Image (spheres, helix red, strand yellow):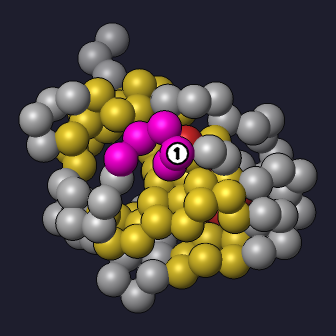
């Protein structure tokens, strides 16, 4: 996994701790065997245009993002054993449930990825 954070286009930090998948196995497992994310934490899966919560024990919020880092769709509180998709998405950001209530992420908003410097 690659560690980083996401900001809006004005460099306002939106998510402080983001894990970015770097292998097929990481994409396949996603959050399946993980405890629920905390606020301001996220999992970034790419390439990816759909997610499921089969086998999960908690709901998540989902943000679909295109190749140019624009938000194309959101799904709030995706419950266990559900699926969500967007044909326009290249990557998916999985968040703690109710994160989208705390932050304004309208369709079209551009995000920026930053690697954590160690």
Looking at the image, which residue sits at the far top?
118
Residue 13: percent from the left, percent from the top?
29, 28
Nearer to the camera, 76 or 118:
76
Looking at the image, which residue sits at the far left?
10
Q: How many marks?
A: 1
Nearer to the camera, 23 or 77:
77
Image-based side of 74 in relation to 60, left or right: left
Q: Quadrant of residue 108?
A: bottom left
Crowdedness near tag 1: few (<14), some (14–19) or many (≥20) residues, C-alpha within 10 Å: few
Looking at the image, which residue sits at the far bottom?
87
Q: Quadrant of residue 83?
A: bottom right
Which structural element holds mark 1? helix
Identify whether 4 is placed above or below 53: above
Identify whether 38 is placed above or below 53: above
Residue 75: percent from the left, percent from the top?
55, 66
Q: Inspect the magenta stretch and tell me whether residue 103 lies in it.
A: yes
- The residue pinned by badge 1 equals 101
**What's the residue at 49%, 30% (across, down)?**
40
Q: Considering the image in quadrants, where does the C terminus appear?
A: top left
Residue span colored magenta: 100-104
Q: Inspect the magenta stretch and tell me whether residue 115 lies in it.
A: no
Whether residue 25 is visible here, answered yes or no, is no
Residue 91: percent from the left, percent from the top?
40, 65
Whether residue 111 is visible here, answered yes or no, is yes
**What's the residue at 89%, 52% (across, down)?**
57
Image-based side of 78 in relation to 106, left or right: right
Residue 109: percent from the left, percent from the top?
21, 57
**What's the residue at 47%, 54% (across, down)?**
93
Identify the main secondary structure in magenta. helix
**What's the residue at 21%, 29% (across, down)?**
12
């Amino acid at each position: 996994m690659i560690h980083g954070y996401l900001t809006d286009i004005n460099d306002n930090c939106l998510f402080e701790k983001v894990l970015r998948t770097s292998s097929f196995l990481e994409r396949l497992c996603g959050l399946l065997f993980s405890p629920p994310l905390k606020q301001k934490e996220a999992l970034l899966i790419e390439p990816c245009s759909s997610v499921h919560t089969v086998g999960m024990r908690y709901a998540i919020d989902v943000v679909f993002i295109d190749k140019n880092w624009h938000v194309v769709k959101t799904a709030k509180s995706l419950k266990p054993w559900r699926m969500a998709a967007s044909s326009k998405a290249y990557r998916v950001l999985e968040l703690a449930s109710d994160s989208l209530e705390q932050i304004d992420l309208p369709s079209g908003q551009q995000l920026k990825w930053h690697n954590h410097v160690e």
